[in-house]
């Protein structure tokens, strides 16, 4: 049991959260339902274009939205990654 607790402790300390906002660069409008993925999970932006997602060290975020190019951004100890398509 101690082994599993050690693994959980390691996983929880190596996880980080990043948040941000995704907007359209031409119109300045928030982009709703943009898919944001890390190696750990996937989420979508809310009605204001905001998101929050967990990532691991050395991870990158992938942003996907219909009609736009897929963008991959490296994350290194960031707390905020905002993107303007």
Image (cartoon, rainbow, N blue to C red):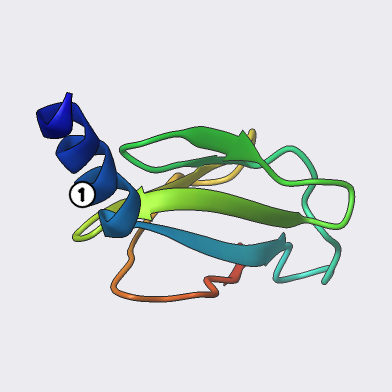
Within 10 Å of the Cα at label 1, are there few (<14), some (14-19), or many (20+) other Cα atoms? few
Q: Nearer the viewer, residue 27 or 55?
A: 55
Task: Indicate the secondary structure of the residue bearing disc 1.
Answer: helix
Quadrant where the C terminus sits is bottom right
Q: Nearer the viewer, residue 22 or 6?
A: 6
Residue 54 vs residue 40: left or right?
Answer: right
Q: Residue at the left extreme?
A: 3
Q: Give how far across and how far down residue 72 sits, in percent.
A: 36, 54
Q: Please give the name of the residue rendered at 72% of the width and 46% of the height, measured from the top-left corner.
A: 45
Q: Residue at the front extreme?
A: 2
Q: Give how far across and how far down residue 50 sits, in percent.
A: 74, 58
Q: Please give the name of the residue rendered at 70% of the width and 70% of the height, measured from the top-left corner.
A: 25
Residue 51 visible in image: yes
Quadrant assignment, res 78: bottom left
Quadrant assignment, res 66: top right
Q: Give how far across and how far down residue 69 sits, in percent.
A: 49, 46
Relative to 51, is 41 above or below?
above
Relative to 68, is 43 above or below?
above
Residue 71 visible in image: no
Relative to 14, is 40 above or below?
above
Q: Please give the name of the residue rendered at 19% of the width and 60% of the height, measured from the top-left corner.
A: 58
Quadrant where the N terminus sits is top left
Q: Residue at the top extreme?
A: 1
Q: Please give the name of the residue rendered at 10% of the width and 31% of the height, measured from the top-left corner.
A: 3
Label 1: which residue?
A: 10
């Amino acid at each position: 049991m101690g082994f599993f607790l050690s693994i959980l402790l390691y996983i929880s300390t190596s996880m980080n959260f990043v948040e941000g906002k995704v907007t359209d660069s031409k119109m300045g409008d928030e982009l709703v339902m943009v898919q944001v993925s890390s190696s750990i999970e996937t989420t979508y932006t809310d009605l204001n274009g905001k998101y929050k997602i967990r990532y691991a060290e050395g991870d990158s975020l992938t942003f996907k939205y219909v009609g736009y190019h897929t963008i991959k951004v490296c994350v290194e100890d960031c707390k905020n990654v905002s993107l303007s398509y």
